[in-house]
Image: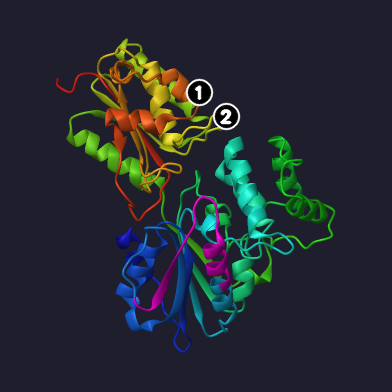
Amino acid sequence: MRPLVLRALSFMVPPAQGRVLVVGAGKASGAMAAAVEEAWGSRVADGVVAVKDGHLAPTQRIRLLEAGHPVPDERGAAAAREIRALAESATADDLLLVLVSGGGSALTPAPAPPITLADKQAMTRLLLAAGANINQLNTVRKHCSVLKGGQLARAAAPARVEALLLSDVIGDPLDVIASGPTTPDVSTFTEALAILDRFHLREKAPRGIVERLERGARGEIPETPKPGDPIFERVRNTVIGNNALVVEAAAARARELRLDAHMLTRALEGEAREAAGRLVKTAREIKAGKSPIAPPACLIAGGETTVTVRGKGKGGRCQEFALAAALAIDGEDDVVVLAAGTDGTDGPTDAAGAIADGQSIARARARSLDPAARLADNDSYPLFSALGDLVVTGPTNTNLLDLYLVVVGPLSR
């Protein structure tokens, strides 16, 4: 991550007379702030960046404020107010440098009155439990906020704005990464309402949020700034890193291990257990000689799956993927699966993900664990913890979607 920021800054010219102000939010944004100070040092006049708990980095001029993720909290709301105030203080001579990475949306809740923080917390929980993807979640968030959906750029105008983004979204849509605080918003109030209806949440959602979305859909509330708005004339958004870096690094390492590396997709999505089934099916075809890919091989995918929570267990999308894969390859030799989040966290757990093979289910049952029941209860974490097969990295200070690997065949030729 650090080299990506330093390289981007090497192509950027600080203002001749004005100040350099730094704001940002996300799991990687603290490390990004440290890289900015390394490159520009005393040129930074002031800065405030919201980071997830445990993701602090050494900075002197840029204040790092820890906040809640994935469910926003009051610390994040306070950080959002400071970020907005600093942006509003910028003049036409100043440069506002915005450091954006995954998690930034939850870390900077800025509810539009009369919506409360509690309303946004409840809405986030409902959407996550329903299996909404990041695009859908952020569409709703943007229309309940005074900061997201291009509104940070509106606050900073007429200052020059340079936003550096680490993408944790499939396809790198600028308006979705951290809810696009400095980009034109193509989504609408009507679309946000449609998302609630798709997941049958209009009656369950906080009334303040539903009423705001309904008023916006009727045209009673101004929309978020759209493409062509003059506030974006001095704004530039640059994606400096995405999931391609992860899958390419995985492929290079697989080749070093003398595996045939095959990148299947950088857009893996959908229910975690269903996505696991698709990758396992491909692995079986390779083992059966029904594929042009010959073992030993490493299948590589990037993306972000979702989980529709129906149980009361503990886990995350990567651990659920690994458990579903373990059930699918039960008893098979020469198939190993890894699923992990590049940020080092998977759901509300301290694990990045998990590893599974053909013996995982037998080992679980030997410990009196019922894997199928655990999957039904969305309770993958305790099972993999008991097996010692969790992937625990701690904060990685980056966030470039998830990585899914399936190694097929004996590891010798």
Q: Residue at x 30, y 17 (%)?
A: 358
Q: Is residue 260 left or right of residue 16?
A: left
In the image, the segment drawn in magenta is: 60-81
- In the picture, the disc for residue 376 is 1
Q: Is residue 98 visible?
A: no
x and y percent of residue 1 in the render? 33, 58
Label 1 sits on what residue type? Ala
x and y percent of residue 19 in the render? 47, 84
Is label 1 in contact with label 2 (beta carbons under 8 Å)?
Answer: yes
x and y percent of residue 314 in the render? 45, 35
Label 2 sits on what residue type? Arg
Helix, strand or loop status at disc 2: loop
Q: Which residue is drawn at 57% across and 65% down?
A: 77
- Residue beneath label 2, please? 310
Q: Nearer the viewer, residue 77 or 184?
A: 77
Q: Residue at x 51, y 82 (%)?
A: 94
Q: In which quarter of the image is the C terminus?
A: top left
